[in-house]
Image (cartoon, rainbow, N blue to C red):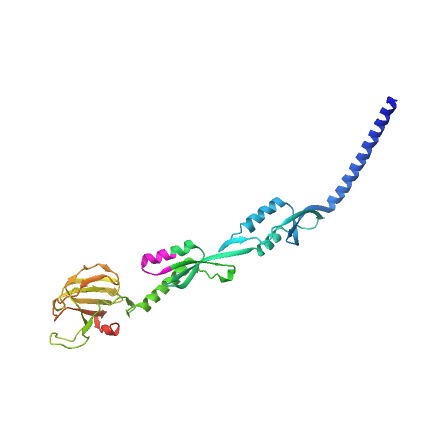
Amino acid sequence: MNFILKRKLKYYTKEGIKVLGMVGIAFGFVSGMLFAKYKPVYAVTLGDQNVGYIENVEDFEKEVEDNVINYTAKNVDSVEVKETPSYELTFVKREEKTNEQEIIIAMQKDMDITYKYFEIALEDEVIDSVDTKEQAEAIVNELKEKDEDVDLTITEKTTKNPEDIKTDEVEVAKSNISTKIEEKEMEDAVAVVEGIKFAKLPVTGTISSRYGVSSRIRSSTHTGLDIATSSGTPISVVADGTVTCAQYSGAYGNLVKVSHGNGVETWYAHTSKMYVTVGQEVKAGDIIAAVGSTGNSTGPHLHFEIRINGNHVNPQNYMYN
């Protein structure tokens, strides 16, 4: 009895192996036919929309991280991804192409991007804009080295619309701001003589003798303007320049002369004290002397002259009007 059972078991085992072999061959044949015509890919869905196919999810996720989540471009401050992709394994015909780059571009178009740039203002008036804070600070610091009193401010601006951004290269922005500073200084100047900005009055007081008048104490007409004020009043130089004279000079008494360039020179006479020396560089507003009554003088006052290419001109054509 056991012998018969063993023979039957052996028979059915062989037959089972044959069937499994035939099934394996059939499966292999069908699979071969299937893979010859179709290939496995991943369908990508954004929201409810199928946007294409990719070959490898891991590689594609790396592309998404590099080019979408960590998207970098000019003026980009932050990125918000509206839809994250989902994947489903599927089969498509061999000739069907995957479109990883097109999907990346579609995701980039759907990003919520915040852009950032920096405005530079002169006395609260925006003059120009640059891309980065470092660029703005470099421009402001360089211009403040030339004039520490210039009122320049930097403001960070953000926008969702890249068309709002009108930035310039650093050198262009610096040139535009420098030009505006010069224009503003000219507008605020006390006077402009041959392109030289007079930023300060030398003193304030009462005009006691005008240009061109005759007097018993002079051998010729008056070559400057006399401003009467108390002795010791500080005298300011009217513009940047170089001291060319600081000494006693006959009828002028203690005389300071300052050359400002473009042939323009200013004279400050009858001073009681002189605080500068020949060759010294001075800035507009620096105190160079004190009002006095030295030389040919009838009382404490400043005799102020403007000379252009050596010729005296009427100061009231430019100031003390």
Give the image location of residue 50, x and y in percent. Answer: 66, 53
- Quadrant location, the N terminus: top right
Q: Is residue 160 above or below residue 1?
A: below
Q: Is residue 80 above or below residue 320?
A: above
Q: Is residue 171 left or right of residue 40?
A: left
Give the image location of residue 291, x and y in percent. Answer: 17, 65
Residue at far bottom of view: 214
Q: Is residue 93 visible?
A: no
Asked if residue 75 is among those painted magenta in the image, a careful observer would answer: no
Asked if residue 140 is among those painted magenta in the image, a careful observer would answer: yes
Q: Residue at 34%, 57% (x, y): give it.
A: 144
Give the image location of residue 180, x and y in percent. Answer: 37, 65
Of the pair 45 and 261, the residue shown nearer to us? 45
Give the image location of residue 208, x and y in percent. Answer: 17, 74
Q: Which residues are magenta?
A: 139-152
Q: Residue at 39%, 55% (x, y): give it.
A: 137
